[in-house]
Image (cartoon, rainbow, N blue to C red):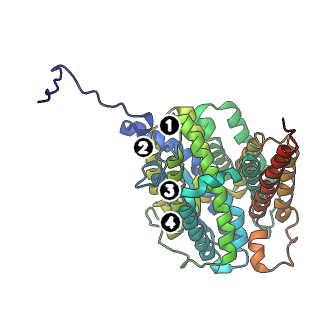
């Protein structure tokens, strides 16, 4: 008979130590650290609906509703990423919010559609989200077609395409107004820009991270005695409110709009993949294929569900990755607490309407830095794109040039069919397509032929 194994009586089971990513912190620290993440991303979440709303003809009240919905859906998407379920979620301290990549394409989709603009945009986002969700397991095989030369070009175009919005805000936002472009408006924008830059220069730590938010507050306080703002939006807003599902009507599905948003979804998935890899290194839990797949599923599912609650496409917020690196707080539950705060803010219309107090020239001044930072991020990505190769420089030159057509010559495509304009009027969409095609032509198809030619030219021994 086999001997019965014997154990020492003084042996003590040692519990396996939790990874810092899975640690829970004391409630107060959990809340304050989560609030830091919300403060760092707040301006980035409310900016896209602030741009898209007026561009498609929404009133100030409806735009404020969109901002609240964006906060709510960003919170839901963040919870999907941090807590996750089944095979959904990276389960890293990963913040999700409204993607800037979709702003210009959404404006192009909604142009001239009147009250149908938002339903058409939402319909396209739903389909793009579902397509992305299905494609998530296979996306890893496609990432090689989105090297830095492609992603850097697209991110640069996103920032450059948004800068005209900041310039319009700086002038007052309403071209029909008597004071549009006045020295008072532009002066206020310049002062806000200066405040943001000074804060960025002299503040340190977390305060430096939220310098744009602090600049908005300072600019608004200066504008108050000048009569450039009012609190009517806050007074008329409810304290508690739920983002009514499909508030703007049932989603509508147009092929051209869907194609445009599917291109944006590819861009968002590529950016999120890069961010997941970077965050995995920062927190000491390198992202494997399963983590990336789960993160992309959370991104795409969050995007598909957002229109139900009147939100836009969601993707990673890179600035919060920087905050994780700076604070050394790696717990995903801290970011989940931030997601909960975002949901609460989304359920409080008054909180969302506070941003409506900020005068447009103040927003314009801060927007120059906010949108310019996006372009700078793209340029930083291009710095690692082997630009010394003539082909890569050519890819960037052609893609950026074609992507800038809607900005430099808005009427360039006026003779084209309306359905094509949905894609062509978005420099981000056209620039992305051109960059992908040229990268395939120069760095994949051509590379195979060159390798074969070199092999054939080698002397046999």
Residue beneath disc 3: 77
Residue 377 location (% of width, % of height) = 72, 44
Q: CA distance from mark 2 to mark 1?
A: 15 Å
| Above or below 137: residue 190 | above
Give the class, few, some or many, for how many residues have Cα within 10 Å of label 4's Cα (few <14, many ≥20): many
Tell me the SS state at disc 4.
helix
Residue 368 location (% of width, % of height) = 75, 50
Q: CA distance from mark 3 to mark 1?
A: 21 Å
Residue beneath disc 1: 285
Give the class, few, some or many, for how many residues have Cα within 10 Å of label 3's Cα (few <14, many ≥20): many
Q: Which residue is depicted at the point 84% across and 35% down?
A: 461
Please indicate, yes or no, whether residue 192 appears anywhere in the rendered image: no
Residue 24 location (% of width, % of height) = 38, 38
Please indicate, yes or no, whether residue 53 appears anywhere in the rendered image: yes
- Which tag is nearer the camera, tag 3 or tag 1? 1
| Above or below 13: residue 276 | below
């Amino acid at each position: 008979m086999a001997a019965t194994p014997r154990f020492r009586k003084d042996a003590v089971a040692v519990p396996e130590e939790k990874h810092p990513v899975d640690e829970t912190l004391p409630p107060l620290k959990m809340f304050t650290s989560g609030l830091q993440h919300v403060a760092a991303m707040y301006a980035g979440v409310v900016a896209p609906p602030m741009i898209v709303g007026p561009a498609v003809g929404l009133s100030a009240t409806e735009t404020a509703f969109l901002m609240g919905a964006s906060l709510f859906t960003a919170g839901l998407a963040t919870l999907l990423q941090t807590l996750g379920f089944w095979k959904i979620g990276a389960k890293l301290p990963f913040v999700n919010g409204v993607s800037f990549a979709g702003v210009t394409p959404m404006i192009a989709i909604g142009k001239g559609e009147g009250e149908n603009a938002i339903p058409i945009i939402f319909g396209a986002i739903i389909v793009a989200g579902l397509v992305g969700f299905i494609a998530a397991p296979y996306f890893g095989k496609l990432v090689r077609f989105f090297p830095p030369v492609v992603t850097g070009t697209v991110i640069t175009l996103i920032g450059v395409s948004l800068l005209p919005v900041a310039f319009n805000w700086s002038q007052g936002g309403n071209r029909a107004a008597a004071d549009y472009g006045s020295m008072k408006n532009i002066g206020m924008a310049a002062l806000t820009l200066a405040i943001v830059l000074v804060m960025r220069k002299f503040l340190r730590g977390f305060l430096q991270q939220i310098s744009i938010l602090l600049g908005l507050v300072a600019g608004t306080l200066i504008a108050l005695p000048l009569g450039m703002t009012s609190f009517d939006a806050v007074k008329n807003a409810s304290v508690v409110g739920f983002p009514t599902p499909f508030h703007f009507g049932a989603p509508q599905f147009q092929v051209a709009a869907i194609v445009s948003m599917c291109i944006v979804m590819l861009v968002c998935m590529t950016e999120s993949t890069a961010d997941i890899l970077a965050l995995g290194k920062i927190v000491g839990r390198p992202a494997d294929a399963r983590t990336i797949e789960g993160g992309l599923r959370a991104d795409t599912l969050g995007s598909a569900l957002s229109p139900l609650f009147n939100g836009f496409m969601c993707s990673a917020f890179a600035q919060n990755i920087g905050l994780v690196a700076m604070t050394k707080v790696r717990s995903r539950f801290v970011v989940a607490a931030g997601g909960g705060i975002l949901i609460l803010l989304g359920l409080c219309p008054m909180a969302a309407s506070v941003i409506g107090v900020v005068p447009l020239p103040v927003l314009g001044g801060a927007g120059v830095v906010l949108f310019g930072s996006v372009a700078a991020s793209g340029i930083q990505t291009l710095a690692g794109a082997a630009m010394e190769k003539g082909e890569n420089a050519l890819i960037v030159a052609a893609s950026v040039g074609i992507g800038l057509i809607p900005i430099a010559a808005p009427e360039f495509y006026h003779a084209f069919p309306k359905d094509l304009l949905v894609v062509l009027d978005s420099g981000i969409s056209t620039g992305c397509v051109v960059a992908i095609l040229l990268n395939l032509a120069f760095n994949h198809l051509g590379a195979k032929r060159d390798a074969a030619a070199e092999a054939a030219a080698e002397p046999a021994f």
